[in-house]
Every structure is written in structure tokens, then in C-alpha cells.
Image (tube, rainbow, N blue to C red):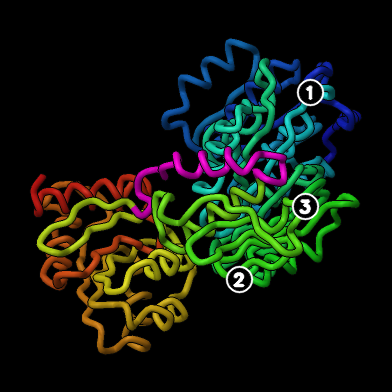
Amino acid sequence: MGGRHVSARRDLDGLDQTSSWDGVRAVVAGFGVSGFAAADNLNHLGATVTALDESATGKEEKAELLEVLGATIRLGQGATAVLPDDVDVLVTSPGWRPDAPLLAQARERGVPVWGEVELAWRLRHPEHAAPWLAVTGTNGKTTTVQMLETILRTAGLRAVAAGNVGLPIVEAVMDPTPYDVLAVELSSFQLHYTSSMSAESAAVLNIAEDHLDWYSSMDDYAADKGRVYEQVQRACVYNVDDPLTEQLVRDADVVEGARAIGFTLGMPGVGMLGLVEDILVDRAFIEQRSDSAAELVTVDELASSAPHYVANALAAAALARAHGVSQQAVRDGLRAFRPDGHRIAEVARHEGVTWVDDSKATNPHAALASLRAYDSVVWVAGGLAKGARFEELVTAVHERLRAVVLLGRDRAVLAEALARHAPDVPVIEVEAHETGVTDDEHGPMGRVVEAAAGLAQPGDTVLLAPGCASQDMFTDYGARGDAFAAAVRARTGP
């Protein structure tokens, strides 16, 4: 520590939102949505707060607000290089790598490192804390949590989607009007820095290759996902068709009496939810589960019949049923739910060709799920691959591919996989600068749409399911989907 004087560290165990945090010295790493929520609430509770972020863009107004309230905010290049001397806890925003200098210094000095989720769990009210229904997985988290929120509200409960989607989890926990239950989306990054959470029930939807630019191995990535099952109280919901999710349940240390509940697109066994013909059914939460199943909703009543969408509905239903929600509320909630934009969203039908925006498919597993929903596809793909490979994906879907249009920085990774495993499929690469992309028919996405239109035949689906992140060319996946939709409408008309 270079001879620095470091005062005695405050004991943080047992502190919650009813406690005085006076004297607690907290550093918040990152000043985005979750970082601001953490800093704001810790400051409100009386802690001495310092928030650090390498970027000041778009954060100045919130920084001024917290500084007026007594916090210290340091923004700009170099702000996160050195951890202040006297620190009781470092609260990190999601996505900060464990080898980041600030976090490495904290570990060297024995300073506890919490994520925003860990902070939120510790801040729960001791008398009326809402139970958490937690969802993680490589793909489908947001849709599943939003479905779950809709079901819970349909059941008359005060519920909200929080965490990696919707409301920051700290804000949900600190709401002066208590929620009945929280539907919590958790990323692997958030779970990495979470240790004491004990969700009422939790689901891992699937595990597939992703974020290998952050993790050293798939095992490490899967292990962080599996942390969601630790100390689960009622139900560990797993994907029967993804054995790794079941293994994560087996490996977890759960509260005695917690059940393992599977969901499957096939016929469900006892203790599972699944499909009987075109009906979603429950064989886990009814007394007669040994020889019967309770009908929940038909596939036709859902907003999409795509297999991954149906799987998400089953997982949401399992978590809701574990919480005690009625069959009717599950049915009515799933019937009413409509997914966010850029998730298997039909943009247009023109001259026998359907155009679909699934820009939210930002990794190979999500793209695979999307491609499997259609029989004959002109696939629009590419972007930032984040270290992922596409050989298994191409092998699995090559018979569905009419053609492929590639864009983005890492399009060569996809082109190589297609050349090896689908050499007979036509591929067009659209080059574009990584800045200055426009969303009109003359921009790079306009050229993508023109290329796809020239390849598509009546009965085909032109599917934007990039399998890659978007930030090489677009602000986010939403901007990419908007550009695609605008280019499609410019070509096909209103």
C-alpha cells in the first residue's frame, strides 16, 4: 500500500435500508444507469460516496445533482485508475472485468467488491422485502422477465421487471411503496459480483457460447450463470433440452425443500412444464401431476409460435406458478403479452416475402433460435462477434438458407463458416464504414435490403438475426433494427 494510512474498515454485515450508513465509505465504479442508482441510494442512506467513470458523456447533469447532495463524482479519462485510500466497499457496475485496475486494487487491499445486485439484496427491507423471481441465460432473458411481469400483474400483484431490464434493481428495492414480487433479469456479469442473494425461485433458460471476450472459458461463463440458483428457496427452473442448465441445478447449494422444475418443448414428465400437442401445460404445480396436466395456454394464443418464444413462455409460467399464481392468470398474462421491438418483429410482407427484424439476436445461439422458426431464409447477419464462432450454427441451419447477406466488422468470421459448412449457399458481403451509418434507403442497410430482395423468392423470410453485437456500426441493436425496418419500408412501401 506504499505506506499509505488506511483507517479501520467499517463492518457492513447486517446493514439494510433501515440502517444508518453514516461512516461507510463507498466507491462506485461506473456512473451509468446502475452506477447512478447505487451512488444515489447509498448517498441517501448517509454513506460517503465517490463515483468514478472514464466517460463523462451524458452523465454531467446527474453528476451535478449528486454533488449538490454531497457525493464526489469524478468523470473522464483516468478517473478510474486509482482506488481512493479509505474505502469500505467498492460497488461495481455490470460489465467491469475483474482485472480492471480499480477492482484489482480492491482485491489486493481486501476491500469487498459488490455488484449493484449484491447491494440491492443487502438493502432489502427487513420486514417487507419482496421475493425475487430471477432469470438468467444466454438468450431470452428480457422476453421471459417481461412475460413474467405481465403474468404477475395480471394476477393482481404489484410487480416490476428489474435488474438487467426495466428498473434498476436498487431502485426497485428502495421504492417506498413495497412491491409484492420482483421479476429480476440477471446477466452473467451481474451474477459474477453477487454472493448473498437467495431468490425465491430462479431460472437458467439456456447456456451457449457468448462473452468469450470477457470470460477465459465457457466453464467460467456457465459457473457465473449457475450462481442464480445458489440458496434458491422454492424452485430451480431449468431447460430440459439444455442439460447444462440441469447440471447447474445439481451443483447448486439450495435451501432445503427447493424443487427442480424442468421446462421442455416436448411432452413434460412429472415435475415439468411442456407441450401436449399445441397446448402449454403444467405437470409440476398441480396435485394430480402424476397422471394429468393442467392446461395453461395454446401456442396459437401466444404472440409468436417460434420455438424459443414458446420456451420463454414456459419458463415464465414455471416461475409464476412456483410463486402461487393461478392457471388463469398465467393464461391471461401470456395471451396479453407482446414482446419489445426488434425481437422476431414482422416488418413487412411484400410480393410473397416476409421481412423480420430480430436485431436483438446478438449472439450465435439467439440467431440459431430465430433461424429455426422459419423454413426458407435469406439471412442478414454480422457485426461484432465478441469472440464467438459460427460453425455449429451454420451446420445446423444450412438447409434452411436460401442465401446470406453479411455486414459489419466481423463478417469474415461468418463468411468463413459459411464457405466451409454451406458452400452451396449464395453469400453477399456489404461493406460499410463503421461510422456515419444512416438509416435511409441509401445507407449501408439500404444496400443490405436491396441485396436481400434480389435473393429472396416468394415464400421466403428475410431475417435480420445478426448473431453479433451492433456497436461496430450502430448505437445499439435497437438502432440496427430501426435502420433495417426503415430500409425495408423504403423499398416495399407503406
Query: Residue 303, how many percent across, how many down?
Result: 40, 49
Q: Earlier in the sequence, mark 1 or mark 2?
A: 1
Q: Is residue 224 in sight in this rendering?
A: no
- The secondary structure type at the circle numbered 1 is loop
Q: Earlier in the sequence, mark 3 or mark 2?
A: 2
Look at the image and tell me in which quarter the C terminus lies.
Answer: top left
Q: Is residue 494 left or right of residue 263?
A: left
Query: Badge 1: how crowded within 10 Å, few (<14), some, or many (20+)?
Result: few
Q: Residue at left 60%, top 32%?
A: 155
Find the residue positioned furthest to the top: 68
> Can you identify the residue that label 2 sits on?
241
Type of amino acid at the residue the image marks with label 1: His
Rendered view: 64 above or below 158: above
Type of amino acid at the residue the image marks with label 2: Asp
Please identify, in this view, whether the residue under mark 3 or under mark 1 is nearer the observer. 3
> Can you identify the residue that label 3 sits on?
287
Q: CA distance from mark 1 to mark 2?
A: 37 Å
Query: Residue 73, how many percent across, how many down?
Result: 59, 24
Rendered view: 375 above or below 423: above
Type of amino acid at the residue the image marks with label 3: Glu
The residue stretch that appears in magenta:
320-344
Q: Are the residues flagged by discs 3 and 2 in contact, CB closer than 8 Å?
A: no
Query: Residue 410, how many percent across, how many down?
Result: 36, 68
Q: Are the residues flagged by discs 3 and 1 in contact, CB closer than 8 Å?
A: no
Query: Residue 7, how many percent across, how many down?
Result: 88, 28
Q: Residue at left 59%, top 48%?
A: 316
